């Protein structure tokens, strides 16, 4: 069946070419290739090489490479989290003294620090005292002392004493870069940073930075400050016994401060002397011969840190200054005369249980007076800057600004009648309504229903825009009609700054406690303040002035141009008056800390009167002086033969509950009128009233 196949030396054998090979390619196929032939670009596939086994050297090289990469990452992490420059900074904010604008010191706050010390300029006994008690092998270890760690571990295990085993380098790492928490993670980071410090700083640099930052009690940081505080001498001139006492303080400075615990400081100093003897720095005879150091503490005059203005200004002072060891003295914008006037007026205003806040600033935001409550000693909470309360009708300023910006005029009309539809139905004070009135009349009489209708007409977005661009931080609920009546919240400082933006017609006004450089023309061109058009600004000022002269703010009227608005929140929980005259903008708030209602206090009453009294002292001639009524000179008549002799000694008596005294010089009547003491004297110079009658009842808000 099958022909026997013979393989030769051709493609399939060792013999010669077969007949098939000889006839390929067949006739007519041209250059067609033999499918059994190898292609011209054929490359035989070499077998996979045999990989040598991975030796220990191979693993070692890759391990070293990984450690090198980890080392680079560690260096980058330390450069970010533990920059060497940070160890040069004081660990506590330095002392800052604040002055009023006239140079009167008003507050002092911060730690007592001085310039850093240089180790090579200190006497040997100063350095030796600290090394003996803190780190005897400081100049021989690399940041970590294994012997010290072992000794501390053994002491902690046996319970003989509790020791930390930290070197001076570790202590510098801890006070400069880490928190005081006690944890294994913090200890490991401390050791790591200690190695970092040892690698980049000399031993003297490390020791100098440690001595310049260590705490020595009495709010004193650094060896120089401690030397001046306790002995009133520079550290370069410390005696051995003085250096020993200071070296003993760093372990527990608050407990061992010699000004409060001389016995404890002396016991600790004895331990330092013994350590110096044990370390070979002193002989026993030299140690025994050292006298007890004598303190020479020079206390600086204490200033009241607890003032509302100082509490508000100090963070600004810290932000303005770079961290350094130097004590700073900064002049604020506070006007000492106006501050005393504000405190005096508030103290005698008869607030009862209610609290009070007052802020006075220039139109550029410079705060010149601040009262945050009746007593800082009893309550340091600053109600002028921290309390966010309802501004009441003082918020209507933004509603009417939005209306004027939308093209309305003060003589545009709005309906002042009860709102009978919708879920929100506010009422006017005293249920007084005037029908269809102008915007100016609605503002003058502080109509609630007119303000809500105007709010709904211009839209909440435009009203909120006016409030936020004038400096209020909000948040404010869009679409809430009660916002028109001040249902949102703001601080008195924010509201006063907003009115300052109207007073100076540039906004926003940022309240500040330190003078600022005026903007150059280029800065003003690029980032200058915004302004209202002259039409909007003048019309808004006209309405603010009308509100004081013939509206709800009549109790605040002055005899100079003045502008303002009253505000009373629901149930008399907040009462405000904010206004301005000249370049002075003042806001007054009264309320209870628990937000409970007040009895009989409205924005047009006591707040307006406090505002007027303050303006009267701040601006000469702002409040008209009462003039004595002229009295006709008495006729020359002969004295009555009976009454004459009696007048020479004077006649006293009571008429209707008032004390009456008649003398040849005149008539004096004293008593209470409406609960207020009044004394009237009538003599040849006329009538003189010693106290004013209580002001008339408050107008409706």
Image (cartoon, rainbow, N blue to C red):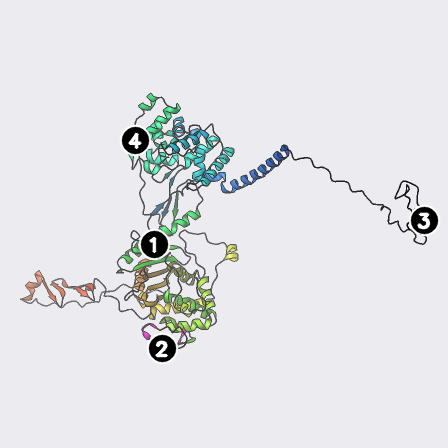
Q: Which residues are magenta?
A: 418-440
User: From mark 3 to mark 2, how far is it between C-alphas?
Assistant: 124 Å
Q: Which mark is residue 294?
A: 4
As helix, strand or loop, the secondary structure at mark 1 comes to loop
Magenta-drawn stretch contains 128: no
**Sequence-first tag of 3 and 2:** 3
**Sequence-first tag of 3 and 1:** 3
Q: Which mark is residue 23?
A: 3
Say if 406 sits above or below 338 in the image: below
In-image side of 541 versus 671 (left or right)? right
Which of discs 1 and 2 lies nearer the camera? The answer is 1
Magenta-drawn stretch contains 426: yes
Q: Are marks 4 and 2 in contact (CB under 8 Å)?
A: no
Q: Main secondary structure of the magenta part?
A: loop
Q: Nearer the viewer, residue 31 or 243?
A: 31
Quadrant of res 437: bottom left
Q: Is residue 332 visible?
A: no
**Sequence-first tag of 1 and 4:** 4
Which percent across, then down, holds residue 461?
47, 67
Which of discs 3 and 4 lies nearer the camera? The answer is 3
């Amino acid at each position: 069946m099958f022909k026997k196949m013979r393989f030769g030396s051709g493609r399939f054998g060792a013999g010669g070419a077969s007949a098939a090979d000889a006839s390929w390619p067949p006739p007519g196929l041209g250059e067609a290739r033999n499918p059994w032939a190898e292609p011209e670009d054929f490359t035989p596939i070499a077998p996979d090489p045999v990989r040598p086994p991975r030796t220990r050297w191979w693993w070692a090289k890759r391990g070293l490479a990984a450690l090198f990469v980890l080392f680079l990452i560690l260096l980058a992490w330390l450069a970010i989290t533990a920059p060497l420059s940070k160890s040069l900074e004081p660990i506590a904010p330095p002392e800052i003294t604040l002055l009023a604008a006239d140079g009167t010191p008003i507050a002092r706050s911060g730690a007592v620090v001085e310039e850093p010390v240089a180790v090579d300029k200190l006497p040997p006994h100063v350095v030796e005292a600290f090394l003996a008690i803190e780190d005897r092998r400081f100049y021989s270890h690399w940041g970590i002392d294994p012997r010290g760690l072992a000794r501390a571990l053994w002491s902690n295990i046996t319970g003989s004493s509790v020791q930390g085993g930290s070197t001076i380098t570790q202590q510098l790492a801890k006070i400069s870069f880490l928190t005081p928490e006690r944890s294994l993670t913090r200890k490991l980071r401390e050791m790591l940073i200690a190695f970092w410090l040892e690698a980049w700083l000399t031993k003297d640099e490390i020791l100098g930075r440690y001595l310049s930052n260590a705490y020595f009690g009495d709010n004193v940081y650094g060896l120089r400050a401690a030397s001046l505080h306790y002995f009133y001498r520079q550290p370069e001139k410390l005696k051995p016994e003085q250096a020993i006492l200071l070296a003993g303080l760093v372990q527990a400075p608050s407990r061992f401060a010699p000004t409060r615990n001389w016995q404890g400081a002396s016991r600790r100093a004895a331990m330092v002397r013994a350590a110096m003897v044990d370390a070979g720095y002193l002989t026993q005879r030299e140690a025994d011969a050292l006298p007890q150091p004598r303190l020479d503490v020079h206390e600086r005059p204490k200033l009241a840190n607890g003032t509302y203005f100082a509490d508000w200004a100090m963070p600004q002072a810290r932000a303005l200054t770079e961290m350094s060891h130097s004590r700073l003295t900064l002049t604020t914008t506070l006007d000492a005369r106006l501050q005393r006037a504000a405190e005096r007026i508030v103290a005698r205003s008869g607030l009862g249980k209610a609290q009070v806040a007052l802020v006075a600033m220039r139109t550029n935001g410079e705060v010149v007076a601040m009262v945050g409550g009746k007593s800082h000693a009893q309550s340091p909470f600053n109600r002028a800057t921290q309390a966010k309360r309802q501004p009441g009708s003082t918020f209507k300023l933004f509603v009417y600004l939005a209306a004027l910006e939308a093209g309305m005029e003060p003589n545009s009309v709005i309906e002042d009648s009860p709102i009978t539809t919708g879920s929100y139905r506010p009422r006017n004070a005293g249920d007084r309504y005037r029908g269809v009135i102008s915007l100016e009349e609605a503002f003058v009489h502080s109509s609630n229903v007119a303000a809500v209708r105007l709010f709904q007409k211009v839209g909440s977005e435009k009203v909120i825009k006016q409030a936020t661009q004038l400096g209020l931080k909000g948040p404010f609920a869009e679409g809430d009609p009660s916002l028109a009546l001040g249902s949102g919240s703001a601080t008195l400082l924010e509201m006063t700054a907003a009115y300052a933006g109207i007073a100076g017609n540039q906004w926003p006004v940022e309240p500040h406690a330190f003078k600022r450089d005026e903007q150059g023309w280029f800065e003003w061109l690029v980032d200058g303040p915004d302004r209202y058009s002259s039409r909007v600004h003048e019309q808004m000022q006209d309405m603010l002035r009308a509100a004081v002269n013939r509206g709800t703010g009549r109790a605040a009227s002055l005899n100079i141009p003045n502008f303002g608005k009253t505000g009373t929140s629901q149930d008399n929980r907040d009462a405000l008056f904010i206004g301005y005259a000249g370049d002075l903008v003042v806001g007054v708030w009264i309320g209870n800390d628990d937000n409970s209602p007040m009895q009989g206090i409205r924005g047009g009453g006591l707040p307006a009167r406090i505002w007027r009294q303050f303006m009267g002292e701040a601006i000469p001639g702002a409040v008209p002086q009462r003039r004595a009524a002229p009295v006709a000179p008495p006729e020359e008549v002969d004295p009555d033969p009976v009454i004459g002799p009696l007048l020479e000694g004077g006649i006293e008596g009571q008429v209707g509950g008032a004390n009456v005294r008649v003398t040849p010089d005149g008539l004096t009547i004293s008593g209470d009128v409406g609960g207020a003491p009044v004394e009237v004297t009538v003599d040849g110079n006329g009538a003189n009233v010693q106290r004013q009658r209580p002001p008339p009842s408050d107008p409706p808000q």
